[in-house]
Image: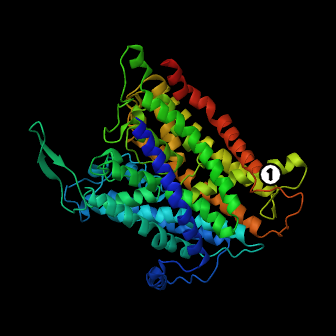
Amino acid sequence: MNTEYAGIIFMYLATVALAIPLGKYIAKVFNGEKTWLDFMAPLERLIFRFSGIDTKKEMNWKQHLFALLSVNVLWLFYAFFCLLFQAHLPLNPDGNPNQTPDLAFNTALSFVTNTNLQDYSGESGATYYTQLFVFMFLHFVSAATGVAAMMVVFKAMKDKVTDKLGNFWDYLVKAITRLFLPLSFVVAVILAFNGTPTSYKGKDTVIGLQGDTIHVSRGPAAGMIAIKQTGTNGGGWFGANSAHPLENPNYVTNMAENMSIMIISISLVFALGYYLNKKKLSWVIFGVMTVGFLIMVFPSVTAEVNGSPYLHQLGISQTTGAMEGKEVRFGPAASAYWGINTTVTSNGSVNAMHDSMMPVSGMAQMFDMMVNCFYGGVGVGFLNFYIFIIIAVFISGLMVGRTPEFMGRKIEAREMKIASLIALLHPFIILVGTALAAYMLVHFPNANWATKPSAWLNNPGFHGFTEMLYQFTSSAANNGSGYAGLTANNIFWNVSTGMVIFVGRFFPIIGPLAIAGLLANKKFIPESAGTLKSDSTTFGIMIFSVIIIVAALSFFPALALGPIAEHVSIK
């Protein structure tokens, strides 16, 4: 067990050690400085010339937002129709069928928004064409969309008074060519050399140890798995995701995939410090995020390593920990660590079944997604954190009797209203969705128009409620992981979570962009003796307190009905 602990400690420290120089590199890329990947510039110029884009033409925040939303709508329609007619498209050696309209609606929205909730089973619900030219394509561009939106906020914070916030298309393309593509290539090579398939052939037939004939799905999976991790996408090639032995063959690939989940999200925090030349601010933000992350890691790892209290009560020793739903290749500690990594970001991939984990782990995983800003998804994690910065600055200013200021700009009623609406929107869509599902389950258990709610849950009581709460929490946080005990591929869940996915993705992007654009146009106020230091430990504590209070007040009653009640019932 000490080896397992050493493994997860090494993974985290190695991730941070690599993220710091990567953050410096990212800042150089978007500052227009020379980097070793400048040989990609001719490809970028070709893309811009072909598209008729002038990257020297800077945009204000509204133009950025229009470009972001319009291109995402285009990608949505492309993905939707490809999934509707995938059986008739090329690269379908296994003869997989078309997706139903409600499933295609949910899947297309899910991948466009970097959520990757999979109500279908990976290798049987999609073809090689849709896996590569829809899902993998969206893995790249949805992640790059988050980085491009984040760069608008960075630019607004950097310049004193401006409405020129760079060019969206320049940010989008460089995020792919200079960041996601090279990192994904490295991870894909590691996976391929360790046994992840890269073949375009259909199912292979093998004879199992018991003499059974088994048809094993394969395909060019390594490349897609690499970007699903580095881009905090999470949508797997196989239905079992990274618990599948071909998607995650051994402990080496488990480490590579696990580290790639968080490395860009963490590096973007350090990139802020290098980009603004305010390294202390980036360390304060990183410190707040890391405290939140560690508070969730410790109880989850402890719960999984100790195992089920039920078995302890029966006098059964659990030297291997809680192994239900876990791979023996990884063990309980590494599985619990992955579970927190994947939910503290918007990744959502799994190397163990979250539905089988202890209630404490389930609560920690959901709380990660409810907060949705401890590291978070690439780009959007900082955007969510930015909302809490604005709220914390406003409250701090009122407490000391000064006009709230952040980075030389006054925070006034308009910015605070936007920040408050975005902060309240997240719990609203989660709790309303869960309440609606619970109401239908109780009052219309056999309604055909609701696809028989009585068939949704494989688990009764507290755990069944947790399954529904988790599904909406994962959708709103653009995470995409789920509890396998919930039967979600039906009209109600596909449509309801699809709507939550859409709102949970784009409104938290619109809000920070609007705030950043409004603040960038305001008169710059030089720092004075009374200016609130945003790069101080005190301010970091203030931000952390605001995050915890908002999340606790919003979600504690729901958690008390689900994982907390389940945990108490088995003690």
Res. 85 in view: no
Q: Is 238 rendered above or below residue 407?
A: above
Outermost residue, left side: 211
The residue type indicated by label 1 comes to: Phe
Quarter of the image with the N terminus is top left
Q: Is 535 rendered above or below residue 78?
A: above
Q: Is 163 rendered above or below residue 463?
A: below
Residue closer to the observer: 55 or 176: 176
Residue closer to the observer: 50 or 348: 348
Residue at (91% x, 49% y) in the render: 401
Q: Indicate the position of residue 286 as horizontal and vertical percent values.
A: 63, 53
Q: Is residue 223 left or right of residue 69?
A: left
Dot 1, crowdedness within 10 Å: few (<14), some or many (≥20)?
A: many
Q: Please identify the quarter of the rendering in which residue 130 is found.
A: bottom left
Q: Is residue 373 left or right of residue 244?
A: right
Res. 421 in view: yes
Residue at (51% x, 74% y) in the render: 174
Q: Indicate the position of residue 73 as horizontal and vertical percent values.
A: 50, 64
Outermost residue, top side: 314
Q: Which residue is mark 1?
A: 394
